[in-house]
Image (spheres, grey):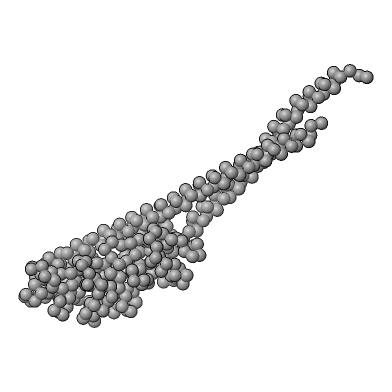
Amino acid sequence: MFSKLEKKVTFMIVLTLLICLFLVSVISYTTIRKKIYDSFWDLSLQHINIQKENIHLWMKYIEEIARQISVDPDIIDNLSEVSKNIDMIPKLDTICSLDSKILGIIMYSINGNNYSSSGVSGYPSMIIQNPSLIEFIKSDKQSQWVLRSEEKIFYYNYMNYDATKSIITYITKLYDSKSQLCGYMLLDTSIDSFYYFFSSGENSLNYANIFITSDDGFVAEPRYAQIESHLLDDIKRTFEVNSAYVISSDKKFGLVINRLTNSNMKVIVAIPLNRLYTSLNLLIIIMIILFAILTVVSFVLGSVLAKSISRPLNALLQKMRENMPEE
């Protein structure tokens, strides 16, 4: 008797529940998605920052080595031509032996003389050949780390260093006992030494590649040889942003940007986003399954509630018919 009413009640209950479920699902998905997204980047940035701190500690170590050279009176006197009582090569070689990542040490006198550790040959007689070094010399800075790539770095024995790779130089100004500028010291290090500090994170974050760039737009050869052209364009795009990371144009990589202190360099780590997308896709699947289950439950619940309303009405109608007098 009340079948139409039962169907309408069922429809209204199910419709109301589905609308509520849909709104709850959208809000839940948005909230959880944001947390997954934020957690992914927070953990990635935290992990990479640890590697960056390791680089900074090593850079401080190299800077301390350079400082010890700059306060050596024999070296300074020899450089300023107050005296030439020592052979510079053994001293510089001893300093180079303190860290295997040091390729060589070159010292320039403002008078035009230069000295270098052994294993260095054909080094430019004038450091002003490099634009970054020219900028440093003209500035008030006392020291700076500089990414260099003068076509090919041919100063070192090819057995000790790949001539096709860039080098990273720590340059500092040297002063004599009268606090007068007497020269410059360049301490060259391998670019691989910088990549090395990020290698410990490759297994956990599955790095696609690591890049070192300079402020003048130069992108050094990456840690891994293969690089897609569009990714290189995305790397150059990071020169114009101030954020901690950007998403590549193909949405496959997150480019984490790390500024190195006292330098003209940034280290950019390309992290594949497939893990992030896998987590988000799994979340969508879970939400769809839950929505489907709750939809079935809403139909069952709507039917039960509708019957609980129509059953007493049917019983009441039946009693009324039984109590009606027969004509």
Q: Quadrant of residue 215?
A: bottom left
Q: Quadrant of residue 205?
A: bottom left
Q: Assign the N terminus to one quadrant of the image.
A: top right
Depth check: give the residue in front, 170 or 225: 170
| Residue at the image point whose x is 81% and y is 24% from the top | 317
Give residue 120's position: percent from left, percent from top: 22, 77
| Residue at the image point whose x is 44% and y is 51% from the top | 38
Q: Assign the C terminus to one quadrant of the image.
A: top right
| Residue at the image point whose x is 39% and y is 65% from the top | 240
Decide: is 327 above or below 7: above
Give residue 34's position: percent from left, percent from top: 48, 49
Tell whether 79 sits left or right of 131: left
| Residue at the image point whose x is 57% and y is 42% from the top | 24
Give residue 321's position: percent from left, percent from top: 85, 22
Q: Quadrant of residue 124?
A: bottom left
Depth check: give the residue in front, 112 or 96: 112
Give residue 68's position: percent from left, percent from top: 15, 64
Decide: is 223 above or below 129: above
Q: How many marks?
A: 0
